[in-house]
Image (spheres, grey):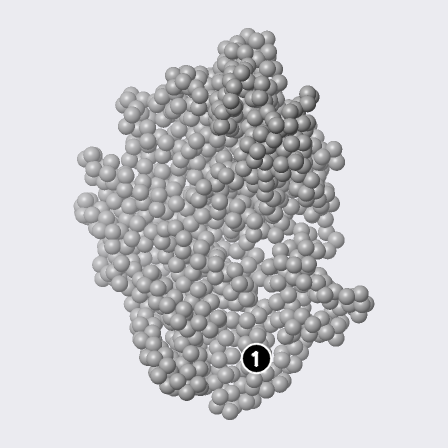
């Protein structure tokens, strides 16, 4: 559908074409896959895609192509997908499928979501986030349904220009599972996705880079790099392009200068007839030489088309250039004939290459460029102020220096972006608007409620927060603070300050947050009470609690609660009740605290304040977790995430922490496969700053022996500091050092992590206890090893280190974050830290480990197993072999069930060294349960395949195959691949004939 016809012959690329043809063949058979095609500008990405699309169409596939367009710093949300939907809407074959998916109308501009999300003191619930999720899910469902009607090839060109919403939607589509290879006999979706991007455009901070890094790790996504053509292939291309014989010297010269770039070669060849003499060295010069060979009218058309962008509709170009239809057609025929423009099947024209458009555009005179942008802006406006053209109008108005209209169109584009659930594009349009503000006459500024500059800054700050850009939200709030200094409106000034305090807490700048909330509270009189004072007080309570000033927090919260009750501010009452539940008595894990939180949830729901309702739900969940009631957490978290989804706030702080806590609970309960599945789903919708939320999946990977986990944890530390990301990285990297037996590294990571997580008032983080217990394991082993080797000096040094580490951990466990002792989890980690300290100073103590095992009985399956193994070591050292056997057996059973290969190996090592001979045989008393994929891997193991060969046969990576092999070894309690196969035959998991041929 809407394929471009190229006159250029297709040369070379046999290997790449074979690989892509294989993808299409598997897609037609129901195995969906995606390929990301990288290459430098002009290397042949579009031509290769066109060849593949032609072959796909001949084989009966429907080809849908969407293009990304360079609109500068602001993008048109979902542009390539909107283009695809437009093609589908024009094809009667798909009318019934499209009718079942209303998202088509929405993406084509007919959406009616008008939920607001302004940065007020009482945020409203609304549908932008809900609509965004429905949009993503609806697009996935539409593609799945279309693939039931026809095998489908989806082509996305120029991803390097994709707007953030298109990138987010692509992430969602490729991560949600409909591209995964089906198991058994079930047929999958008949769908292939090919997406191209310019590799040489991806500078270090290009927004596409992190997305590509995520996507290439997915099992159903491959990357294909189009490298420069070989010299012989360039020579073949040159000779195929010319009817007349080419001098060998000319061919050699062009081949040398083209350096394998097909487009360079074509342009160099086309310029050989130029009368300019020596050919210019720059590609832009070559392109302009070709342009100047055209008649004046054709050059005029090209210059006009360049201002429109890479592609332009025929009617819009006709009206902008102002030529009679016959002259326009003649000029277009010249441009197409000279391979500068390509005619599309949809009646639009595109530059043969983006570089050609850029060269023509750059050659325009400033006045000419401005005039043409103005013409396009007027034409688009004359078609009616359609929301979907607002971004284009804003771009053209800005470049034509009509700043008043540019500002108005930017505001319209921001409103449209919000309606279609594109907060990043809303932010960019609002920032463009704010950049223009000082240059626009007062008469051209927007009017009406919420249209003043400070309020728009607060709205932009909210959009930044929703897009996961917390630090940008702070910057915009600071700009609002500078702007509000020129107003006498004390309520607005106070609102800006307490809003800034809230955003600063989001980036862990606690002292500054407390200072601004103090200023806000002082600007508004407490009597008579006002809504602004109540919300300023509520923010001040949060800031005071964050810096440990519980006395101030309690005093202000109680007074503000009375004022909220007097003013009947339902949502403010709810917010203050949550704060008091955290501050009073035994806190949120007590019965009294939960009663307050339940009341707060109901009040927030009644008041329609989604953020406060989510805060209450998160606090209920974390209170249950801290009380050791893990199962009770999950319903609260499910309700909270559902509320966030319906309110469009999934990227805001509380939902991100809910996702982390949900995965943490699943990890702690030992529901690891469910944890990993949920994390995979979450990754598709998380903002860039929300990577920490899938931290528990890293804990699972580390416990299962995934060697890449440490690198992924270190990646969380890149960029600006994020407290939760630093916490996750600290846990993973400390434990990784322990598992490798590196006590020095474990202690260093513990210290650096605690230092980074200590707040700016010097309060140590609660996680200090866990990190200390982990590091002390390596310290205890190092001390024991030194004693065993007779190095008393080294043993003494490690003993001193253990004592130094234990004291801060004990202090943190006994005071907790709110001044009360930590709950069951903290007490368990402290018991383990003390047991490891005893091991480091005097040797293993069975009584200390018995207490530790009892403490972890609250529900942490993996840590309980690890402690039971340490207990078994201590018992064995004390000569209590029977008890040691029982503990080793229990630890081993858990390791097998969880697939915790490193723990299983340590258990087996203890069994061998301690001659606890019945531990393994008893552990494997029941039938072994293998997944369908594990049975596939086991079958190939029996045939002697390597991990790489297994991956190739099952279309998974060698790393994934390795993980499956490790899981099989753990489940079969096998020490080697050979032993696993032998056990599988004995347990009748394999039929004997499968191994006959090796």
Q: Is residue 142 above or below residue 863?
A: above
Image quadrant where one finds the N terminus: top right
Tell me what residue is drawn at x 56 percent, y 30 percent. Answer: 264
Tell me what residue is drawn at x 59 percent, y 86 percent. Answer: 916
Using residue 971 as the reference point, say whether residue 722 is left or right of it.
Answer: left
Residue 781 position in % (x across, y down):
44, 79
Most foreground residue, 224 or 493: 224
Tell me what residue is drawn at x 65 percent, y 68 percent. Answer: 968
Q: Is residue 85 above or below residue 983?
A: above
Residue 270 position in % (x across, y down):
59, 22
Q: Is residue 484 above or below residue 783?
A: above
Most foreground residue, 217 or 408: 217
Tell me what residue is drawn at x 60 percent, y 26 percent. Answer: 250
> Residue 154 lies in what quarter of the image?
top right
Residue 782 position in % (x across, y down):
42, 78
Examine the rendering and report whether any part of residue 652 can be seen. Answer: yes
Q: Secondary structure at mark 1?
A: helix
Image quadrant where one finds the C terminus: bottom right
The residue wearing badge 1 is: 909
């Amino acid at each position: 559908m809407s394929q471009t016809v190229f006159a250029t012959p297709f040369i070379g690329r046999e290997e790449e074409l074979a690989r892509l043809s294989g993808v299409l063949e598997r897609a037609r058979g129901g195995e969906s896959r995606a390929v990301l095609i990288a290459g430098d500008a002009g290397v042949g990405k579009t031509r290769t895609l066109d060849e593949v699309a032609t072959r796909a169409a001949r084989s009966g596939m429907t080809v849908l192509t969407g293009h990304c367009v360079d609109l500068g710093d602001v993008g048109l949300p979902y542009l390539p997908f909107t283009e695809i939907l437009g093609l589908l809407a024009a094809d009667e074959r798909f009318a019934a499928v499209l009718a079942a998916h209303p998202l088509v109308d929405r993406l084509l501009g007919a959406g009616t979501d008008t939920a607001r999300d302004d940065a007020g003191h009482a945020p409203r619930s609304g549908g932008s986030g809900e609509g965004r999720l429905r949009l993503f899910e609806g697009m996935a469902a539409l593609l799945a349904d279309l693939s039931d009607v026809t095998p489908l090839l989806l082509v996305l060109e120029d991803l390097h220009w994709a707007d953030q919403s298109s990138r987010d939607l692509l992430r969602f589509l490729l991560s949600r599972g409909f591209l995964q290879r089906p198991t058994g006999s079930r047929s999958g979706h008949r769908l292939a996705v090919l997406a191209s991007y310019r590799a040489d455009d991806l500078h270090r901070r290009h927004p596409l880079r992190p997305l590509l890094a995520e996507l290439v790790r997915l099992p159903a996504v491959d990357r294909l790099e189009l490298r420069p053509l070989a010299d012989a292939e360039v020579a073949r291309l040159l000779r195929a392009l010319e009817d007349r014989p080419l001098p060998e010297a000319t061919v050699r010269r062009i081949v040398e200068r083209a350096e394998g770039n097909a487009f360079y070669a074509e342009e160099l060849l086309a310029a050989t007839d130029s009368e300019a003499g020596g050919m210019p060295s720059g590609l832009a010069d070559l392109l302009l030489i070709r342009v100047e060979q055209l008649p004046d009218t054709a050059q005029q058309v090209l210059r006009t088309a360049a201002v429109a962008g890479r592609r332009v509709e025929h009617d819009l170009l006709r009206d902008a250039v102002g030529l009679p239809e016959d002259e326009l057609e003649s000029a277009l025929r010249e441009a197409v004939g000279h391979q500068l423009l390509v005619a599309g099947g949809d009646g639009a024209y595109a530059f043969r290459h983006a570089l050609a458009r850029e060269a023509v555009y750059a050659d325009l005179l400033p006045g000419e460029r401005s005039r043409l942008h103005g013409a396009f802006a007027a034409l688009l406006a004359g078609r009616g102020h359609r929301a979907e053209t607002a971004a284009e109008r804003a771009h053209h108005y800005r470049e034509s220096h009509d700043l008043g209209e540019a500002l108005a169109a930017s505001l319209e584009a921001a409103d449209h972006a919000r309606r279609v659930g594109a907060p990043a594009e809303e932010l960019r349009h609002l920032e463009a608007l704010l950049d223009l503000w000082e240059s626009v006459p007062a008469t051209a500024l927007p009017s009406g409620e919420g249209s003043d500059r400070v309020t728009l800054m607060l709205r932009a700050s909210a959009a930044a927060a929703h897009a996961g850009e917390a630090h940008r939200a702070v910057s915009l709030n600071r700009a609002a603070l500078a702007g509000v200094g020129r107003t006498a409106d004390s309520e607005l000034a106070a609102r800006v300050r307490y809003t800034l305090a809230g955003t600063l807490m989001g980036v862990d700048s606690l002292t500054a947050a407390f200072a601004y909330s103090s200023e806000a509270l002082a600007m508004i009189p407490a009597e008579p009470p006002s809504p602004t004072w109540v919300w300023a007080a509520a923010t001040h309570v949060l800031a005071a609690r964050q810096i440990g000033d519980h006395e101030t927090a309690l005093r202000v919260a109680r007074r503000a609660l009375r004022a909220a009750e007097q003013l009947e501010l339902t949502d403010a009452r709810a917010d203050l009740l949550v704060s008091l539940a955290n501050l009073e008595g035994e806190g949120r894990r007590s019965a009294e605290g939960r009663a307050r939180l339940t009341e707060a949830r109901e009040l927030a729901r009644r008041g329609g304040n989604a953020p406060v309702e989510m805060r209450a739900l998160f606090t209920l969940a974390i209170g249950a977790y801290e009380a050791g009631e893990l199962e009770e957490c999950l319903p609260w978290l499910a309700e909270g995430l559902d509320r966030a989804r319906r309110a469009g706030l999934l990227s805001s702080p509380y939902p991100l922490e809910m996702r982390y806590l949900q995965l943490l609970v699943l990890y702690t309960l030992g529901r690891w496969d469910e944890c990993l599945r949920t994390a995979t789903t979450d990754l598709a919708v998380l903002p860039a700053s929300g990577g920490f939320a899938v931290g528990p999946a890293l804990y699972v990977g580390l416990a299962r022996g995934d060697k890449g986990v440490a690198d992924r944890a270190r990646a969380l530390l890149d960029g600006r500091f994020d407290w939760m990301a630093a916490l996750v990285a600290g846990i993973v990297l400390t434990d990784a050092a322990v598992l490798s037996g590196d006590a020095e590294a474990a202690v260093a990571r513990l210290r650096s992590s605690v230092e980074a997580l200590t707040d700016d008032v010097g309060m140590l983080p609660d996680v200090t206890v866990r990190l200390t217990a982990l590091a002390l394991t390596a310290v205890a082993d190092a001390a024991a090893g030194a004693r065993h080797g007779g190095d008393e000096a080294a043993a003494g040094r490690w003993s001193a280190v253990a004592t130094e580490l234990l004291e801060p951990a004990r202090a943190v466990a006994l005071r907790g974050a709110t001044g009360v002792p930590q709950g069951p989890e903290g007490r368990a980690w402290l018991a383990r830290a003390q047991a490891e300290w005893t091991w480091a100073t005097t040797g293993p103590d069975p009584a200390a480990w018995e207490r530790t095992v009892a403490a972890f009985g609250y529900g942490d399956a993996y840590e309980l197993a690890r402690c039971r193994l340490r207990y078994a070591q201590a018992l064995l050292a004390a000569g209590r072999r029977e008890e040691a056997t029982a503990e080793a057996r229990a630890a081993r059973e858990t390791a097998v069930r969880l697939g915790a290969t490193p723990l299983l190996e340590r258990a087996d090592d203890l069994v061998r060294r301690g001659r606890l001979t019945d531990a393994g045989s008893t552990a494997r008393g029941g039938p072994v349960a293998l997944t369908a994929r594990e049975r596939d891997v086991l079958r190939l193991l029996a045939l002697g395949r390597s991990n790489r060969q297994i991956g190739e046969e099952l279309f998974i990576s060698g790393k994934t195959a390795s993980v499956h092999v490790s899981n099989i070894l753990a489940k079969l309690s096998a020490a080697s691949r050979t032993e696993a196969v032998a056990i599988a035959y004995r347990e009748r998991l394999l039929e004997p004939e499968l191994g006959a041929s090796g």
